[in-house]
Image (tube, rainbow, N blue to C red):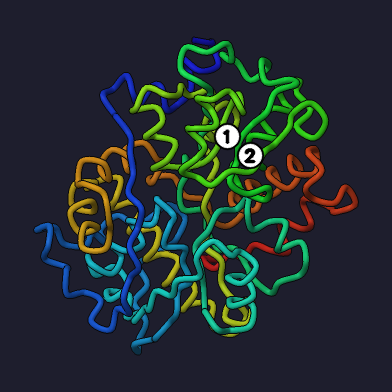
Amino acid sequence: MSEFDRFTRRRLLTLAGVVIASPLLAALPRFAGADEHSAHSGHSPQVANEPADTGEFIKLPQPRALKLAVNLNAVCLAPVVIAHGQGFFKQHNLDVELVNFGNSTEVLLEAIATGKADAGVGMALRWLKALEQGFDVKLTAGTHGGCLRLLSAANGSIQRLEDLKGKTIGVTDMASPDRNFFSILLKKHGVDPVRDVDWRLYPADLLGTALERGEVQAVSGSDPFMYRLIAGGKAQELATNLVEEYANLSCCVVGVTGQLVREDKRVVAALTQAILEAHDYAAQHPEAVAEGFQAYALNTSVEEVVAILHDHTHAHHAVGAALTTEISTYVTDLQGVEVISPSTDAQAFAREITADVFS
């Protein structure tokens, strides 16, 4: 095992007894009575300690209905679901409907930009290229880190990122956040992700087969598929998006329609605060979140959800200047791997697409 692998944040968590896994999410119904599961775990929402840098607790004077666009296949959405079940939206006087937009980033962002949805939650490294095209969407918070993995065959010859020079990596999407992130990481380790690596498309459930057959020498993606390859003894972890300077960066973000930010910033602040509170709650009470999540998940267990919540950095959030700095870092890195235009001013672009709704 390489030095790089041994000292990742994920490995340190593993040494502490954390074993990770994750469910696929089932389709969610409209949450007309969204807080009917609030007593499921026996825990009540915690509002005494607000997420850092979000100011005092915000409760709107009048109820406000909002539509929140989500990808129901994203394994890190359990805290957002529990924002309903544990009453986090309700205590801010928000009536939030979750709308499924699946994996189509462009459709999701267009829905937000055109007001078909008021906000959404997704991965920064999938959104940034689309936002470069001019969608009127503002990022208001980074919610957590730790969604992506790069794996090689168990006991195989690929032990370090440098070993991937001239090799093939299996992915599910050429514009996926994992391909973008591990392209960045490979570049930092002396491997040109454009010229030194062949990226090959596979359905998620065939990545393990491709790795076993030697058709690819590594695969990248998110749980549950990546976790199950490790758990089944087919793969070992080369890297995650919680390594090196990325250990404390957000990978998932809250995006809100620009019009709503401009016209009613306090509503946006309340929504963002509620989402961050839910992530803090997930860090403090993963069992409660996992239990509540079972009402909406398929093919999973409380133990799996607890494990992955431990593995993510749900207690880390970025808002305001910190968020702008994180986004600027990603934009600069994406320029280095030929995803974002080299003519884009990274800092100016980051300031343009982020909004400090708590100042």
Residue at left 68%, top 44%? 330
Depth check: give the residue in front, 161 or 24: 24
Three-letter residue code for mark 1 = Tyr
With respect to residue 190, does 241 lie above or below? Answer: below
Q: Is residue 120 left or right of residue 259?
A: left
Q: Is residue 206 left or right of residue 286?
A: right
Q: Find residue 228 and report its image quarter.
A: top left
Residue at left 30%, top 65%? 83
Mark 2 or mark 1: name the one nearer the start of the chain: 2
Q: Which mark is residue 246?
A: 1
Q: Which mark is residue 147?
A: none
**Which one is closest to the eye, mark 2 or mark 1?**
2
Mark 1: secondary structure? helix
With respect to residue 170, does 94 lie above or below? Answer: below
How many other residues sit within 10 Å of disc 1, few (<14), some (14-19) or many (≥20)?
A: some
Check contact, mark 2 vs mark 1: CB within 8 A. yes
Q: Which mark is residue 181?
A: 2
Residue 122 % position (x, y) = 53, 59
Distance from disc 2 to disc 1, alpha carbons, whole Å, reads 10 Å
Mark 2: secondary structure? helix
Residue furthest bottom as drawn: 62
Q: Quadrant of the C terminus?
A: bottom right
Residue 165 % position (x, y) = 73, 20
Residue 46 % position (x, y) = 23, 59
Depth check: give the residue in front, 249 or 60: 249
Residue at left 61%, top 36%? 170
